[in-house]
Every structure is written in structure tokens, then in C-alpha cells.
Image (cartoon, rainbow, N blue to C red):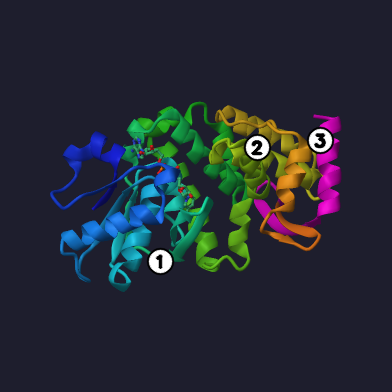
Amino acid sequence: MIVDENVIRLYGHRLPEMPLIAIVGTETEKTLETVFSVYKQLTEFKSDRATLVWCVGGGITTDIGAYAASTYMRGLPFILVPTTLLAQVDASIGGKCGVNFDGYKNLVGTFSHPEEIVVDYSFLQTLPDRELKNGFGEMIKHACIADYSLFKELESRDNLADQLQKGQKDALSLIEQSISIKIKIVSRDEREGGQRKLLNFGHTFAHAIEAETGIPHGQAVSIGMVMAIHLSVELGMLKKGNDGRLIHLLTQYGLPVTLPVSPERLIHALWHDKKKHGEEIDMVLLSEIGRAELVPVSIKRLKEFLSDLRQHP
Ligand SMILES: NC(=O)c1ccc[n+]([C@@H]2O[C@H](COP(=O)([O-])OP(=O)(O)OC[C@H]3O[C@@H](n4cnc5c(N)ncnc54)[C@H](O)[C@@H]3O)[C@@H](O)[C@H]2O)c1
């Protein structure tokens, strides 16, 4: 069992008797060196191809664990038990796994599917507020791109964090809806040829914001979604007013909505985006809340959009 060290600390007494490999759940530990250490311990435990590996933790642990299991002896069967909200609604689904390399996020990895994904909501009881917010960001993203009724449900909740931690059934069903959205999208397009790219809503701006400011990914995606929805309105794809609704929802869930960096610095970072083709970048934009589209936008148009932001912040 490959387990996040905080999960061992909090839930060690609940884990079954089996050899344990502990993982530190930080991005700096999401490396090939950690994978080597997992291989070494799998060898010490005399694992063979019949060994079933359980990966229990947040997205960092499930990404590392699944990658190590799927490459050791050409692939051991594995089961994922995501213990953060973000890992439950997002990271554990879709078969992507891997580690960071040479400063680049998730540069080395595979598509490998688990035997099963076990979502145990009781893990959410010990999840810090900051980690819950990261998960809410992904749930809001799923609602924006594919499910207007989930968006409305999220709007109608007063304190979803508390309801989830108390195990309130109707609140937990929102996690299920969010999981279903991701399953539906990735099962249509496992290798990110088209549909799956819609899951990158907010991410083009977010990567640029992260690169320029170093703020956490979840917060950058929140601001990135606000920018993407403003752009959708600017390009005439989406009715005005919907942008205000998204800003209100993100604020309700404690997520940031204002750009912490100058538009000039963003343009610089966008120029280096890997989704750039010549003078255009493929952006995920909304035509309605609940419907996303992949739209090529010229760098020139993006520059105009960003300089308008500077004039009317
Ligand atoms: N494979 C994919 O498709 C995919 C998709 C999205 C994100 N990811 C990856 O997921 C990672 C982020 O995942 P994350 O947000 O779960 O972060 P994480 O794994 O770092 O977990 C966040 C923190 O919560 C702690 N924790 C875990 N479970 C807990 C619990 N039940 N109670 C208390 N604390 C707990 C961890 O120790 C850690 O400190 C990133 O590396 C990202 O690249 C992968």
C-alpha cells in the first residue's frame, strides 16, 4: 500500500495490515527519485506480478503510486483510494499518472487505468479548508463546461464544506455528479485528442499566472476561469452577466477572482504556452454555462483583451 504520510498519521489505525510505502504529498517530492524509492521498496517486499498495489492519498500520491505500479515489472495491478476532494473528483479519474521532471509539471508519465477507484467520503472530515477549496474549484470547472444544473446546485449551497464533512447525502451527491462529468469526458477521449481538452477550462491563463506569481494551482485556475469567461463574453460567445455569476460562485467558495499580476507579464507567459500554434492559442471558452468549446484565439486578440483589462480592471 502506497500511502500519503498525512493519511498514515490520521488514519494509520484504520489501514489494513500490509506492507506500507509512505509518500510525502508535496510537488517537490513528485519526482522520479521518489518513484525509484518506491521501486526499491516494492523489491524489498518481494512484489511480483500478482501483487495488488493500493495507492491511498491525494493526487500527488495517486499520481506517483499509479505511475510506479504501472511501470514496475511492466505493470502491477493497482487500486486508487483518493483521500482529497480534488483527487476524488479529478486526479484519480481518467488514467493519467506521472511525476514532475526538471521543473516541468507531470512531464513524465503514462496513461494507465486502475482496477478500481474507491471513493470514501469519510476522508474529507480531516481535509483542511485550503484543500477543500481546491476541490471546489474543480467541481465548479466541471459544472461550467458540462453541467448547468450542477452549477445551480453549487450556487444554492450555503456551506458545502460543512455539509460534506458531516456526510450529508444530498451534498455528497454533488461529488458524484462531478465525478460523472469527468468520467463521461475522458471515456469519450482518453488520450486528449479533442473533448478532454475541455477539462483545461481556465488552465491557459492559470499556467501563465502560476508561472508569473507562483500562487497555488487551484487559486490560479479560479482566476484563469474568470479570465476565460470574460474572454467568452468579449468574443460575443456568451451572454453578459454570466461572467458575474461565475465570479459570485467562486467567491462564495472562497476562491480568488482578481488578477494578481500585470496583463503585460501574462502576455509574456502566454507567449510560451505549449498550446500555442503559430500566432494562435487554443482556448477553452464557454458558449453557455454548462457548455464549453475549444476556440483558436489569435495572440493579437488576446493582447487586446488583456490591455482592455488593464484599462478597466
Ligand atoms: N492525474 C490526473 O489526471 C490529475 C488531475 C488533476 C490533478 N492531478 C495532480 O494532483 C496533484 C494535486 O492533488 P491534491 O490536491 O490532492 O494534493 P495532495 O496530494 O498534495 O494533497 C493535499 C494535501 O492534503 C493532505 N491530505 C490528503 N488526504 C488527506 C485527508 N484525508 N485529510 C487530511 N489531509 C489529507 C496531503 O498530505 C497533502 O498535504 C497535483 O500534483 C496534480 O498534478 C492529477
Image spot of residue 230 (x, y percent): 76, 41
Q: Which residue is mark 1?
A: 112
State the residue in front, 62 or 82. Answer: 62
| Callout 3: SS | helix
**Which quarter is ligand 1 in?**
top left
Q: Residue furthest left?
A: 17
| Mark 1 vs 2, N-terminal side | 1
| Callout 1: SS | loop
Residue at 72%, 49% (x, y): give it.
270
**Alpha carbons under labels 3 and 1: distance apart:** 41 Å
Q: Are marks 3 and 1 in contact (CB under 8 Å)?
A: no
Q: Which residue is mark 2?
A: 223
Q: Amino acid at mark 1?
A: Ser
Which stretch did the figure color magenta?
A: 285-313
Q: Amino acid at mark 3?
A: Leu
**Alpha carbons under labels 1 and 2: distance apart:** 31 Å
Q: Residues within 10 Å of mark 3 (few under 14, many from 20)?
A: some
Image spot of residue 133 (x, y percent): 50, 34
**Residue 287 on the magenta segment:** yes
| Callout 2: SS | helix
| Numbered circle sitting on residue 309 | 3
